């Protein structure tokens, strides 16, 4: 399924699927906060390090399946398949956007 995602979110999923991690500066605000697996990552350097660690630990792909928008909040349900325990999983990515960039992301 192909979704018409906001540009910043589309860039985030491209990074998650192996695109250049340096692109976090193009899709996240400078002070953005990401919450994933009980940990918080804030700022471009921390978010890039989080992405690098995930890509180093596992081979995986993320496929956005559905999107719900309410104001500046966009929730994307995605299927994640890879060589990690419990694969595949369906995750919810809740994005908070400011001026077209991701300011918050919570993955559950």
Image (cartoon, rainbow, N blue to C red):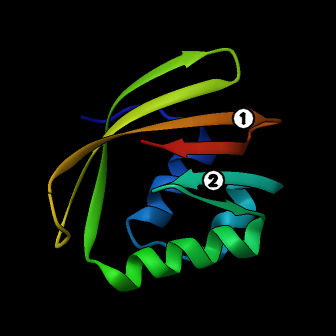
Outermost residue toward the front in this view = 38
Q: Residue at 80%, 35% (x, y): give it.
A: 98
Left or right of residue 20: residue 41: right
Label located before the other in sequence (1 or 2): 2
Residue 34 is marked as: 2
| Residue that badge 1 annotates | 97
Q: Residue at 14%, 58% (x, y): give it.
A: 86
Q: Nearer the viewer, residue 106 or 23?
A: 106
Q: Nearer the viewer, residue 96 or 63?
A: 96
Specify the quadrant of the image occupied by residue 95: top right
Describe the element under mark 2 as helix, strand or loop. strand
User: Residue 1 at x, y = what percent?
Assistant: 24, 34
Describe the element under mark 1 as helix, strand or loop. strand
Q: Which quadrant of the figure contains the C terminus? A: top left
Say above or below: 2 vs 11.
above
Assess disc 2: are there few (<14), some (14-19) or many (≥20) residues with their C-alpha within 10 Å of its C-alpha: many
- Tell which tag, 1 or 2, sits nearer the viewer: 2
User: Residue 38 at x, y = what percent?
Assistant: 51, 55
Say above or below: 73 vs 92.
above
Residue 82 visible at all: yes
Outermost residue toward the top in this view = 70
Q: Do tag 1 and tag 2 residues touch (Cβ < 8 Å)?
A: no
User: Residue 13 at x, y = what percent?
Assistant: 46, 54
| C-alpha separation, residue under disc 1 versus residue under disc 2 | 12 Å
Residue 29 visible at all: no
Say above or below: 56 vs 88.
below
Q: Residue at 68%, 34% (x, y): give it.
A: 96
User: Residue 103 at x, y = what percent?
Assistant: 75, 44
Q: Residue at 50%, 35% (x, y): give it.
A: 5
Total marks shown come to 2
């Amino acid at each position: 399924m192909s979704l018409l995602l906001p540009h910043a979110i589309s860039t985030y999923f491209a990074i998650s699927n192996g695109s250049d991690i340096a692109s976090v500066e193009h899709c996240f605000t400078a002070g953005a906060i990401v919450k994933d697996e009980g940990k918080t990552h804030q700022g471009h350097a921390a978010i890039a390090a989080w992405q690098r660690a995930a890509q180093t630990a596992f081979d995986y792909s993320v496929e956005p399946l559905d999107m719900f928008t309410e104001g500046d909040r966009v929730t994307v349900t995605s299927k994640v398949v890879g060589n990690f325990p419990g694969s595949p999983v369906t995750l919810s990515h809740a994005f908070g956007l400011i001026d077209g960039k991701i300011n918050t992301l919570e993955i559950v």
